[in-house]
Image (cartoon, helix red, strand yellow):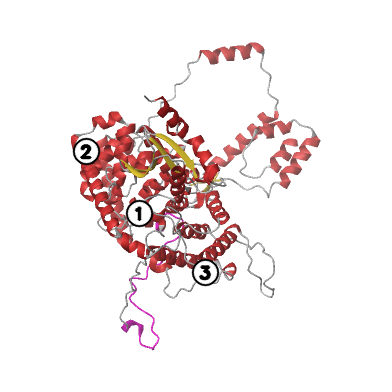
Amino acid sequence: MLAKVLTACRWPGHPRTGLDVAVRFASAKQVARRKKERLQQRFAKVREFRRKQEGDFPVSLRPVRIPEVRDLETLEETEETEESEKVSLAKAPAPKSTEALENAKVKAMKEPKAMLPTKVPNFNLERDLPEEDGASLQAYQARGLAKRLAERNYKYIPNPYSDRPGSLGTDAQAEAKYYTRYFDGTSPKVDHTHRTVMPTMDGAPEDLVEPKARPKRKRISAKRFWIQADHVTPDPQLVAFMSTRELKFAMMNEAHLVRKWRSGQAKGQGPGVGHAPGLPVGASELWMALGYRAAELACGRSVRPLPGESEGVEGRAPVVRCSLQSTLRFLQAMASVQAGPHSAVLVLVNRVLENVRDLKPHQGFYILQAMSRLRLKHPKAGRVMQHLSLAWRSLAEKNFVKSANAVAKLDLSKELWAKPLKMTLATWLAVMAPKNLMRLKAIAVMELLDDEDAMRSYLQRCERDRSHFWYSRHLQMVELHVHLLYPKLWESLEDEVRLFLQEVRHAAHDSTISRDDDEDDEDDEDNEAPLAKRPNFDRKKFNSELHQDLSRILGSMSIPHQNKIAAGPMVLDIHLQDMCIVEASAAWSYYLRSSHLTALARRRQEMLKAMGFDMAVIPYFHWEQLKDDDAKREFLLENLPQQVRPASRAAAAATAP
């Protein structure tokens, strides 16, 4: 009875399992529970299907168990076999003895195991063919792919370096445009240049309208974009309410006016005097207002009143501050004229250096150039070189040379991240254009080409392009640097390079003599127009006002001295006697608001000491703190070399026979 119940619970086609056999000998309670569970799962269970295999009947899916095909004669036989199976299953299996189990294990161990056939790896054409046959196979596959793509009218992505570069062109920025257009994740813009039908407004049929080509976009120079012919100088009181765009255009136009004013000034009032360039009348107050407004926009504060409020409302923080590019533009305008409040300059520089990773490579060049013009030595300036460590070659050649000059002037050549710049400069010397090689200043050569091989290649390249060097001062400084600090390199130079440097030195000496004669002829013209600024300063006799004051105090102390004595390519401030000199370190010899010597001043003092001079350096910030002439005399007596002091000279004269 139990076997009949279990047989009735199983739906047709379900295979017999060992669970059915175990249930036959279970209790009635377990049988009832099993029956209930199977009845619940009868309509919930979905039969499994497998995908069609090769050689099967033509259907997409097939059941797990393929039905058997039987005729009418075999029905009785199958019924008898099923009944015999049921009877055999109803009987409990007889347990095997231990001897039988042991004999079965021994028999299984003695039987030889069948060896499975080894798997033969499939033959792979690309992997197993020789190299030359593989190349032929790849070419064959490529031709087949090209044929199939041509049938589908497939358009290839243009290659800017091929014979058919497409719409990208073959200019220097073709590669950048190529990656920007196809690999930035955005769909390319629709090109309407080949449009044949134009919309009409007069009602004419569109098919009859002749196509019109889009006018070509002309590149506008930076000067034409920024400089406005109708620019009016703003009122300093209204600058605080300017927007970012208005402030950028105002600062760029005002900087252009200041540079134009300086170029038209007479001798003695421009940058050649030795002081920071001056400003027109009333421009100082304007640039203070422009600098403060730029700092407010850069750091996020604004004093612009909201609609409906009075102008006396205190400053508030806007939702967003100006972009990093606008901040860099503010800093560039202030650095070009070296004007504006120092606190505003620090705010702009800090904003740029804190977000230096968001800058592009050419923008890193602008921040280095601005800091070099301002003589601003910032502790975080090394971040710019770190950001450009892998992008120096992406800069234009002219901008790269200017960046190298700026890094050398800022005394950043000893930084860790200056090594990529040194390596790039050393490898770029062989292919650099002569006009850009001439723009490389002496301080950049001395600071960045600190290797003998790099210095040798630079001098050889200069001798090869000797016709392009019309300004010889930088080559003279490099020659003196090599002669004093690299004596072995100087001895190993070729005769052609030495002869070239000698010709440069003689030509510079002759031009200096002719220039002095021309200045003597123009003395009468200069005396007719007295200088409006610093009328007592004579730039022909002294290098700075500090130099003039030092010469006056030395004269009052009856110490013989000479002013502006040439020592090779350099000009000494004050020469006393017995190879003793006095260097007047003016404000431009130090970084802005700092007591650190600039790289130029440091290199100058190193070469003067290497030439054998006993030097006394008088800083401007110590000299300005002295109240009267007596204090200045005492200060000089303490700092002058021992052999030129008045007491030592009197003692030497007394002991002389």
Vertical placement of residue 130 versus 408, above or below:
above
The residue under label 2 is 497
Can you give x and y, in whole percent of width and height, for residue 473 in the image? 30, 46
Q: Is residue 632 visible?
A: yes
Q: Residues within 10 Å of mark 1 (few under 14, many from 20)?
A: some
Residue at the extreme right: 29
Tell me the distance, in whole angstroms, between the alpha carbons under discs 1 and 2: 40 Å
> What amino acid type is highlighted by mark number 2?
Val
The residue under label 1 is 175
Q: Residues within 10 Å of mark 3 (few under 14, many from 20)?
A: few
Q: Is residue 528 left or right of residue 276?
A: left
* SS type, badge 2: helix
Q: Quadrant of the C terminus?
A: top left
Tell me the distance, in whole angstroms, between the alpha carbons under discs 3 and 1: 35 Å
Q: Is residue 245 left or right of residue 510?
A: right
Q: Which mark is residue 246?
A: 3
Tell me the distance, in whole angstroms, between the alpha carbons under discs 3 and 2: 54 Å
- Whether residue 204 is in magenta: the answer is yes
Q: Residues within 10 Å of mark 2 (few under 14, many from 20)?
A: some
* SS type, badge 3: helix
> What amino acid type is highlighted by mark number 3?
Glu
Closer-to-camera residue (79/416): 416
Mark 3 or mark 1: name the one nearer the start of the chain: 1
